[in-house]
Amino acid sequence: MTDASARPRVRIHDLDAVVVGAGGAGLYAALELKRNLGPEARIGVISKLYPSRSHTGAAQGGVCAALGTTEEDHWEWHWFDTVKGGDYLVDQDAAEVMCHDAVETIINLEHLGMPFNRTEEGRIDQRRFGGHTRNEGEAPVRRACFAADRTGHAILQTLFQQCIRLDVAFYDEYQVLDLQMPDGPDGRVTGVVALQTSTSEIHSFRAKAVLFATGGFGKIFKVTSNAHTLTGDGVAIAYRRGLPLEDMEFFQFHPTGMYKLGFLLSEAMRGEGGFLVNGEGERFMERYAPTMKDLASRDVVSRSIYQEIAAGRGVNGKDFVHLDVRHLGAQVLNEKLPDMSGFIRTYFGLEPLTDLVPIQPTAHYAMGGIPTDIDGRVLADEGGRAVPGFYAAGECACVSVHGGNRLGTNSLLDILVFGRRAGIAMADEVRAAEAPVADRAAEAGVTTTRDELLARPDGERPAVIRAELAEIMFSHCGVYRTAALLGECRTAVRALAERAAHVVVQDKGRRYNTDLADALELGFLLDCAEATVASAAARTESRGAHARDDFPDRDDVDWLKHTFAFRDAAGGTPRLAYKPVTITRFPPKPRVY
Amino acid sequence: MEIQLRVRRYDPESDPAPHWDEFRVEAEPSDRVLDLLHQVKWYQDGTLTFRRSCGHGVCGSDAMLINGRNRLACEYLVKDAGSRVTVEPVRGMRVIKDLLVDMDGFWDKYRSVMPFLVNDEVPTDGLERRQSPEERDRFEDTSKCIMCGACTTGCPSFWSNPDYVGPAAIVNAHRFIFDSRDTAAEERLEIMADADGVWRCRTIFNCVEACPRGINVTRAIMEVTREVSGTGHG
Ligand SMILES: Cc1cc2nc3c(=O)[nH]c(=O)nc-3n(C[C@H](O)[C@H](O)[C@H](O)COP(=O)(O)OP(=O)(O)OC[C@H]3O[C@@H](n4cnc5c(N)ncnc54)[C@H](O)[C@@H]3O)c2cc1C
Ligand code: FES
């Protein structure tokens, strides 16, 4: 502590715009900010990880656009599939923008250097993915553009590389812990406050526009495809600042997680012809979804797996089924699905050409998040009032284009289309905005949080609480939910939050204190979990990924609306408000695949 | 099974000299070395420091020296590592704390090779640039790099000359030199022809063995070298 007092307490950075998060959404926004404001503009990307470590790099199967390079396709068909896939909770005007802009965005990405797989004619190759159909449900269509089974890796690289080319300033390994909102929830956002991991120093970034592109929060669940670092930081910070979180009850469980590990085996394995079999060797999806079978939407397939297991048809009576890709042959497995085949060999020691692969649904994707309009502007309430200076894009945001359930390949598209749009809208705001006013209280607050955590001599380890949280969220707020389960879950989460107020950070040093980061991330996870459980308990219907055993039907009379959850500053139950769904073209219909 | 985990520790805030610590950890054979490190950090000693994110070999955060070889901790299984596991930081980079090293120089070298597509012309038909599957195959292998640094920090030429641009940066130069859409190959070859460029490679093949992505790094370096000589940059 001796030399710490000699250092300046807070380091200040004055920028035009700040992007928090260096995944696909953040990087595309940064690129557009530079392109639109010119080389002199001071654009900073703050990321707790080196950009190339962002979880966008883990995305596998593809990014969709109705290019029609291999068969007839139209962006309106894509629009319909997105709305239906989302179980009609999608805002149709927003989905229209996404599906329409998709075509141009993918072409732009190719121009930036994206190494897409190609057709013999040299065009971008496309493959099938769940829920994407020709002519409103007739048959699967080839709409997913891909770079082998590392599409996200290729996107992340391409955008990072072009940001380097345009000389975007990167602040790597800084963890943002608060927003600057000097006038409270009704005023402007004027920057962020961050902890520099290498030194534990506090940095105040002041800017005319701030984008959150901090990714998802799958780590609230035990079995998940998400990275250790996907802890919902941005989502929780907005929530703590009195801003609402939209549709948090909708969390996607992807059908093919590797058993117990949770790592994802891409839907592309089924897109290329793989299928699921139960313990009796039966292709059970034919019973649940006669037309789309194994390529029905993810919520449908995940629930079907749970039903097979509940009926005792799991493999050897256990809680998993098999993915069969043996018939795809060496060429497809090694050339189109090399990483997936590698995961199966490395982590299971199995050979996909000859062995069946044990899979179980894995917590994968947050449909909900910080509510925004179609240009990334964050909404302060269900009435649609925007927060000046504040934007969100990517998985941390809810536009809402995914409604109750996201279609495969629509997330990479979402981060590109809305990351880009947010960047352009921010550039306009930066041109017009005045110099930002600092939020000294936020700077002081973050400093106090750090100092208190480092000073506390003993207490419980954050990891213990984190493990209990993930366990109960997976068992009580997972694929199937009931009032009783959610009630227990809510009580448990609250108790965990109380315990979390007394955790100990054993590492008392300043240098790369990742123990401190663990403690801070636990707090973010708990906030995300609280909003998720409260929103889920209130919604007494089943729609998309939110399946209530006690309310098995979709209820369009009472529930065709978005949830907005506001944190209770006194620590009580979140306040819930609702906003109607925007329906412009497709009236709600029963969802059959 | 019980694992004896030996970790090389270093934290100049508490002790100017590195030392070894030994931990006992319960693990399943199918667990990964990263799980062992987590067990220690979460439940035994919160000061143990390392980077990690994805947990399954795609983000490149956790390259380290495990039982004497560069590997990703999240990809190396206990059943292969055995009941005595030794973990050290990668070589050739300044250690900041425990298993965490200073990556700044590594990223600077990456940036130095112009790791981005250069081509400001787009097709007049408003569509994507055309590229045949064969043309794309030329750089498929090097496009897989996750910049974990296992190759560069396993390279004896890099240990003896820290200015050597290193295999990882050459792999990323290759990625663009052999992309039919790129127009800046000349400039990149110029950079590669530098005294600290491709000529420093002694084809020791450590990099190929170290690469968790199975990239044939040495072949990529040789292809770049051939290109450098062929175009008179040598
Ligand atoms: C295994 C897997 C496979 C997938 N496959 C596909 C697919 O094939 N197709 C598809 O469409 N979608 C897929 N998805 C979903 C998709 O990849 C993600 O939803 C998307 O990449 C999220 O991008 P993002 O830019 O929002 O966030 P991320 O890429 O997650 O980036 C988040 C960024 O925020 C930073 N950050 C977070 N908190 C802080 C903080 N407090 N301070 C500073 N920085 C912070 C991180 O450092 C990181 O840079 C997949 C997801 C997974 C997990
Ligand atoms: S944690 Fe991502 S590569 Fe190991």
Image (cartoon, rainbow, N blue to C red):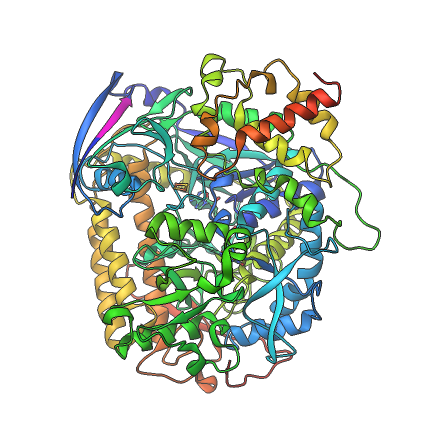
Of residues A195 and A541, which is closer to you in this image? A541
Kindly indicate the quadrant of the structure image that contains residue A319. Answer: bottom left
Residue A29: % across, % down: 61, 47
- Judged left or right of residue B118, residue A16 is left
Q: Does the magenta stretch include residue B228?
A: no
* Residue found at x 68% / y 46%: B134
Residue A534: % across, % down: 33, 68
Kindly indicate the quadrant of the structure image that contains residue B231. Answer: top right
Above or below, B51 against A226 in this view is above
Of residues A217 and A291, which is closer to you in this image? A291
Magenta region, residue range: B6-10
Residue A183 at least partly seen = no
Of residues A184 and A346, which is closer to you in this image? A346
Kindly indicate the quadrant of the structure image that contains residue A4. Answer: top left
Residue B69: % across, % down: 35, 28
| Prevailing SS of the magenta stretch | strand
